[in-house]
Amino acid sequence: MKIYVCFSVILMFLCIFFISGALSELERLEHPVTKSDGSLSFLVVGDWGRKGEFNQSLVAHQMGIVGEQLDIDFVISVGDNFYDDGLKGDNDTSFEASFSHIYTHPSLQKQWYSVLGNHDYRGNVEAQLSQVLTQKDWRWFCRRSFVLSSGMVEFFFVDTNPFVEKYFTDPEDHTYDWSTVLPRNKYISNLLHDLDLEIKKSRATWKFVVGHHGIKTAGHHGVTQELVDQLLPILEENKVDLYINGHDHCLQHIGSDGETQFLTSGGGSKAWRGDIQPWDPKELKLYYDGQGFMSLHITHSQANFIYYDVSGNVLHQSSLSKRSVLL
Ligand SMILES: *[C@@H]1O[C@H](CO)[C@@H](O)[C@H](O)[C@H]1NC(C)=O
Ligand SMILES: *[C@@H]1O[C@H](CO)[C@@H](O)[C@H](O)[C@H]1NC(C)=O
């Protein structure tokens, strides 16, 4: 009798274990496809919110022009949305001064999908995630981590901030709002588990992962070793096409044929750091130290990406192809 009770209890725990292990808690949303050929166009900007200063306004102006030419579907922000210390609350007027009053071009009146950067974590994180901002400006959508699907593309937005050890052990004179992140190890392991599950489950033609911190970068901050150790294996195993980030205030393309490409778009405002670290020239396709942004145009067979400087000049373009198997 005792053995049976014991057996059922173990069985019950195993069931709970497997069921919870198979579920992901990541929020999912869908962006409707509006173009008849199913293609998708969007811009990527990062590290921007400086009330128009450091050429933020000029970059915004060029984004508007390119956004119109490409008839973009939405904009992605790769974090560091509000300098220096995020938003103080959902009533912080930096929201209007750095976002609503800056990205005014008609072509930019689209949904913005945003993640948080380390500077955002120095302020009130909940404020940036708040509905109140969306009521002030319908374009605003910011989450820690989420999945966005749009036709043949699936985007996996990842909160990379908690991975970075030094923000916890050596925060210098900064304070970070980790209130809903702690305990850190659990937050990270849940996130990696959910992300891996969602990418494996995805039937999308294209899989893009978006985060604030760089995995492969020759910029000022350099590679984020924690992400190389913990996130990169998931990207490689699941053959993710692109990893898109900010953090380094530059425009950059690193990649080898047939592997995940690493795109940095962190030139939304202050740039010109003047430091670049050595990188294999066969992999480093672009390193530009100044301001700018990127556009992407995705079809069933191609992903084209273009980098622009503060005057709208094309600095670099590249594309990935999907070979369809014809038998
Ligand atoms: C802004 O862009 C112009 C080029 O249009 C450049 O000459 C200037 O140095 C930039 N300003 C800043 C603060 O980066
Ligand atoms: C803004 O909101 C914060 C709480 O989030 C509050 O303490 C502060 O008084 C508010 N400021 C204004 C100007 O309404």
Image (spheres, rainbow, N blue to C red):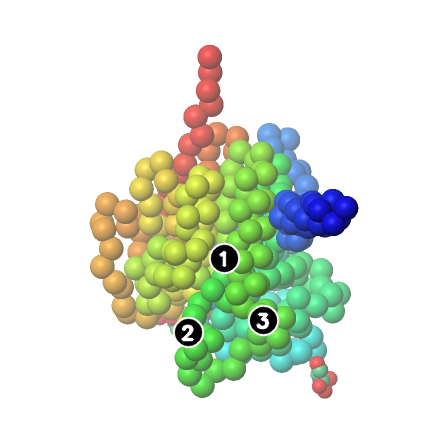
Q: Does the residue labelled 3 lie within 8 Å of ligand 2?
A: no
- Judge the density around disc 3: few (<14), some (14-19), many (≥20) Cα neighbours within 10 Å: few
Label of residue 211 in the image: 1
Q: Tell me which residue sits at (60%, 62%) in the image.
A: 144
Q: Do the residues labelled 2 and 3 touch (CB within 8 Å)?
A: no
* 1 or 3: tag closer to the N-terminus: 3
**Whole-percent x, y for residue 213 in the image:** 44, 62
Residue type beneath disc 3: Leu
Q: Tell me which residue sits at (39%, 56%) in the image.
A: 229
Q: Distance between the residues labelled 1 and 3?
A: 19 Å
Q: Is residue 7 above or below residue 143?
A: above
Residue type beneath disc 1: Gly
User: What secondary structure is marked by label 2?
Assistant: helix
In this figure, which residue is indicated by the disc labeled 3? Answer: 182
Q: Is residue 234 above or below residue 167?
A: above
Residue type beneath disc 2: Lys
Q: In this view, does 163 lie above or below 244?
A: below
Disc nearest the viewer among 1 and 2: 2
Q: Is residue 281 left or right of residue 160?
A: left
Q: How far apart are marks 1 and 2 (CA)?
A: 18 Å
